[in-house]
Amino acid sequence: MADNSKDIITLIDPSGNPVEYKWLGMIKLRGQKYVYLMENHENCHELTILKYEYDEDHEAEAYLPLTKKELIDELMEIFKEEYKDEFIF
């Protein structure tokens, strides 16, 4: 059995609770990096897309919510194309 633990990250939700996410992938678009995540439980089928940043020393990571609908839509279309064989849309 493969060890998929490295594909799981824990982030803190707005209420301060830890939430585990499956790391689905990363994309670079116009000089910025974005990550595709899905909550790590069987009943979750909702995709989360966050902007990925890190400090100059690459020691601290930040996952930031997206606010522009056009950007979210563009990243979703890219995801659908890249992962069309793995997910049903």
Image (cartoon, helix red, strand yellow):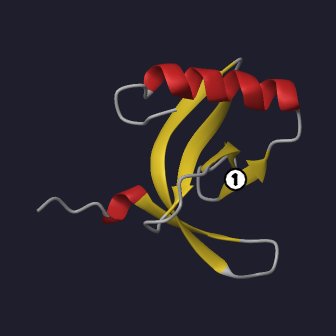
Helix, strand, or loop for circle 1?
strand
Please give left or right for residue 69 compared with residue 53 in the image.
right
The residue that mark 1 highlights is 63
Q: Which one is in front, 61 or 46?
A: 46
Instruction: Indicate whether 56 appears above or below 8.
Output: above
Q: What's the residue at 64%, 33% (across, down)?
A: 33
Looking at the rendered image, the quarter that the N terminus falls into is: bottom left
Q: Position of residue 29 (x, y in %)?
A: 66, 21
Q: What's the residue at 60%, 25% (across, down)?
A: 28
Q: What's the residue at 53%, 53% (across, down)?
A: 45
Please give left or right for residue 46 compared with residue 62 in the image.
left
Furthest-left residue in this view: 1
Q: Quadrant of residue 18?
A: bottom right
Q: Position of residue 20 (x, y in %)?
A: 53, 70
Q: Which one is in front, 48 or 54?
A: 48
Furthest-right residue in this view: 68
Instruction: Indicate whether 28 appears above or below 17.
Output: above
Q: What's the residue at 71%, 21% (across, down)?
A: 74
Q: Quadrant of residue 15?
A: bottom right
Dot 1 surroundings within 10 Å: few (below 14), some, or many (20 or more)?
some
Please give left or right for residue 44 compared with residue 31 in the image.
left
Q: Quadrant of residue 2?
A: bottom left
Q: Position of residue 8 (x, y in %)?
A: 43, 62
Residue type, mark 1 in image: Tyr
Numbered label tally? 1
Q: Position of residue 51 (x, y in %)?
A: 71, 42
